[in-house]
Amino acid sequence: MKRSRIFWLALAGAALTGCTPVQNVSTLQFRAGAAGTQIDAAALLLTQLVPADRLLSISEAVERAPDGSVIVACQAGPRGALSWGLCSHITRKLSAGLLTESPNLFAGGVQTVPASSLNRRAAVIVLDAGVRPEMLPALRAEANRLNRAPYSVGGMGPDYDCSTYQNALQHALGLPDVVPRNAWGIYLPQDAVAGARVLWVGIQ
């Protein structure tokens, strides 16, 4: 990849908090639907309809998220010309009050951050990543091993953006990618939602 292309990707990444471009959802307004039903993950971002008993505040959704689950973080919109989508970041609950993530180009790479860092977001979507309680020691050991690994726009080379870092944690547990590679060969956090089991949605 040419240096100029890497530079512009890096610049866009820094401006937009850190993962990769595109998406077709321009605003977020999650609203409550009938309680007692499952969340339709494939349609969630299009309909923005959430069963009333699964639509919580952000702090409640993060608190209820099981350790090891992943959390897609969203802005309210509307998108700017360089937007990478409204749900442009993905993180993981490591333990009560703590997340593990690779936030953006200038934040210092892979790190553990307080769960309260999500409170500034417009919405969060908690996903079951397949991590069972007996896998948590291995998950935390791998997060510790990768701590301070450098950030890389698009997860190029051996370094990690927010999506490829979460996929690396999955691989360490023998689990499939939580963020799929799209048709352009990149990993978009928002694409994790449609194929997942959605546990909770949190809003401001």
Image (spheres, grey):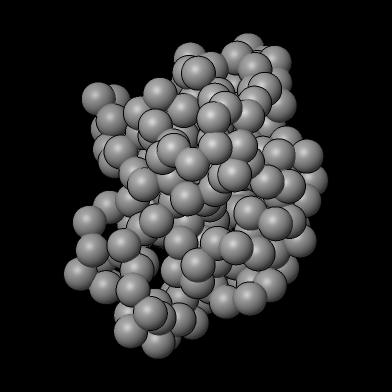
Question: Dividing the image into 4 quarters, which one contains the C terminus?
Answer: top right
Place of residue 81 in the rendered image (x, y in percent of width and height, measured from the top left): 63, 12
Instruction: Please give left or right for residue 97 compared with residue 181 in the image.
Output: right
The one of 64 and 156 positioned closer to us in this rendering:
64
Q: Quadrant of residue 62?
A: bottom right
Q: At 36% from the left edge and 47% from the top edge, which residue is drawn?
A: 197
Q: Is residue 176 visible?
A: yes
Q: Residue at x 22, y 56 (%)?
A: 176
Is residue 81 placed above or below 30 in the rendered structure?
above
What x and y, as percent, mark residue 58? Answer: 71, 49
Say which quadrant the N terminus sits in. Answer: top left
Instruction: Give the residue at x 46% y 28%.
Output: 44
In this rendering, the answer to whether 139 lies above or below 86 is: below
Q: For this rendering, which residue is in front, 156 or 116?
A: 116
Residue 156 in view (yes/no): no
The location of residue 149, given as percent across then percent down, is 49, 69
